Amino acid sequence: MTTINNNSYLKIILDNKEEDVIIKIPMENIVKQLKAKRIRLTPQRIGIYKILTSQKKHLTADEIHGKIKNEFPAVSLATVYSVLELYKGKDIIREIRITFNRSCFESRTDSHHHFYCRECQEIFDINLHPCAVLRKKEVQGHLIEELQGYFYGICSKCRKNSV
Ligand SMILES: [Zn+2]
Ligand SMILES: [Zn+2]
């Protein structure tokens, strides 16, 4: 069994493309987070969560699979899907379906929206102040549990490049 080194750090690069911000999350915190959700820890499961909390934030199951295979060659795509389902059910990751043919996952679970660039196909996090409807927590008698806005267009980088 692989031991978990509590002193190792994860680098997280936020979406701020102009100037990448790197945050270090101690491995200890990741393990704590998974344990708090009563997730049985295996090195593979930790590895998948690590991938989701590091580097690019919105990853497809295929991309996650490609990365986890470097560390655990025996992990199948089906396993990746089942771990993602587990994490989704425990509310520690979110699924983004901004395009019909590509489902992405991220470890950020606070309320935010997404922008999809039709030029470079990147997905960006969008932070907006909660709107009046959301503050009321209901709409036309329906209880709102979650709101995800999808925006489509051309990202700031591609706009600059096309000038
Ligand atoms: Zn773009
Ligand atoms: Zn996001």
Image: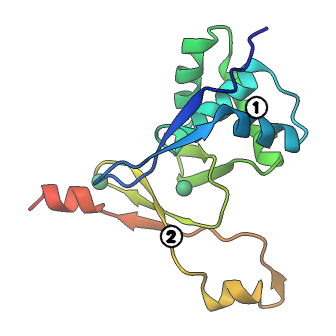
Disc 2 to disc 1, C-alpha distance: 28 Å
Tell me if residue 134 comes above or below residue 39 in the rendering. below
* Colour approach in the figure: rainbow
Q: Is residue 139 left or right of residue 21?
A: right
Residue 41 is situated, as x and y percent measured from the top left of the image, at 83, 26
Q: Is residue 50 left or right of residue 153?
A: right
Task: Determine if the C-beta at disc 1 is less than 8 A from ligand 2.
Answer: no
> Which quadrant would the N terminus be assigned to in this image?
top right
Q: Is residue 136 left or right of residue 153?
A: right
The residue shown at (87%, 44%) is 36
Tell me if residue 25 comes above or below residue 9 in the rendering. below
**Residue at numbered disc 2:** 127
Tell me where residue 141 sits by quadrant. Answer: bottom right
- In the foreground, 73 or 71: 71
Residue at the limit of the structure toward the right, as seen here: 38
**Residue at numbered disc 1:** 83
